């Protein structure tokens, strides 16, 4: 059987409540025993000893709680510092890598746009040339059409080449 004065060390809140209830019960018992005007010296001495023991237990309990609170505060400060350092590191890394990714995407988009325009021009010029050859359409500037065709091909080749060089740089 366990005595009521023994308390577990892992639950300081429970022992605190037990101590408090013991103090109040002892005080009620002590006031019932005393005579109204003539307190006995033995009951006063035992009451003082009980109060002193209770105060010692309360003091020990308060020291333990203060140590625990200071350890928790230290842990919170350390965690706050670690989180702040991690946040600044992550912000710096994400910004630089995101900027590089956006720049490469913009260059790729410009290159694709130039290639698309060159493809459309080439397609329509091929359709026009086929229609001209098959249907024998007489155009007033037909004698200059091969020269126009060559200049068009040169323009498309230079556009594709400039798209390729802008992506590399």
Image (cartoon, helix red, strand yellow):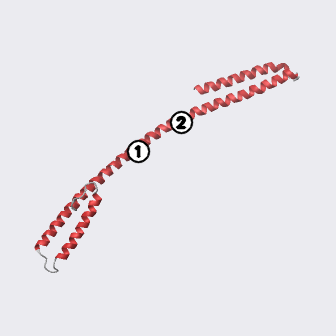
Q: Is residue 7 above or below residue 84?
A: below
Residue located at (57% from left, 32% from top): 104
Q: Is residue 140 above or below residue 21?
A: above
Location of mark 2 (residue): 99
Give the number of marks. Answer: 2
Residue located at (49% from left, 38% from top): 94
Residue 54 in the image: state x and y as whole percent: 20, 64
Please identify the residue farthest to the left as the structure is shown.
41
Nearer the viewer's eye, disc 1 or disc 2? 1
Residue located at (82% from left, 20% from top): 144
Residue 61 in the image: state x and y as whole percent: 24, 58
Name the image quarter holding the N terminus.
bottom left
| Circle on res. 47 | none
Name the image quarter holding the C terminus.
top right
Specify whether 115 is left or right of 132. left
Element on which disc 1 rests: helix
Q: Label 2: how many residues lie within 10 Å, few (<14), some (14-19) or many (20+)?
A: few
Residue located at (42% from left, 41% from top): 86
| Circle on res. 84 | 1
Tell me the quarter of the picture where residue 151 sits: top right
Q: Label 1: how many residues lie within 10 Å, few (<14), some (14-19) or many (20+)?
A: few
Cα gap from disc 1 to disc 2, whole angstroms = 23 Å
Residue 87 in the image: state x and y as whole percent: 44, 43
Specify whether 166 is left or right of 79. right
Q: Is residue 25 above or below residue 132?
A: below
Tell me the quarter of the picture where residue 133 sits: top right
Specify whether 106 is left or right of 20. right
Mark 1 / mark 2, whichever is N-terminal: 1
Please identify the residue farthest to the front as the structure is shown.
1
Tell me the quarter of the picture where residue 57 sits: bottom left
Element on which disc 2 rests: helix
Foreground: 130 or 71? 71
């Amino acid at each position: 059987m366990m005595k009521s004065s023994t308390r577990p060390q892992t639950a300081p809140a429970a022992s605190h409540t037990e101590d408090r209830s013991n103090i109040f019960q002892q005080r009620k018992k002590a006031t019932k025993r005393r005579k109204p005007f003539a307190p006995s010296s033995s009951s006063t001495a035992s009451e003082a000893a009980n109060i002193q023991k209770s105060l010692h237990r309360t003091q020990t309990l308060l020291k333990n709680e203060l140590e625990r609170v200071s350890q928790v505060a230290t842990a919170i400060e350390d965690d706050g510092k670690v989180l702040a350092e991690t946040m600044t590191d992550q912000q710096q890394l994400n910004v630089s890598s995101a900027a590089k990714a956006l720049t490469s995407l913009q260059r790729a988009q410009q290159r694709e746009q130039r290639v698309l325009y060159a493809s459309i021009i080439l397609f329509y010029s091929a359709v026009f040339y086929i229609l001209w050859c098959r249907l024998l359409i007489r155009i007033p500037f037909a004698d200059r059409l091969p020269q126009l065709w060559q200049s068009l091909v040169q323009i498309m080749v230079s556009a594709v080449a400039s798209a390729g060089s802008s992506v590399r740089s």
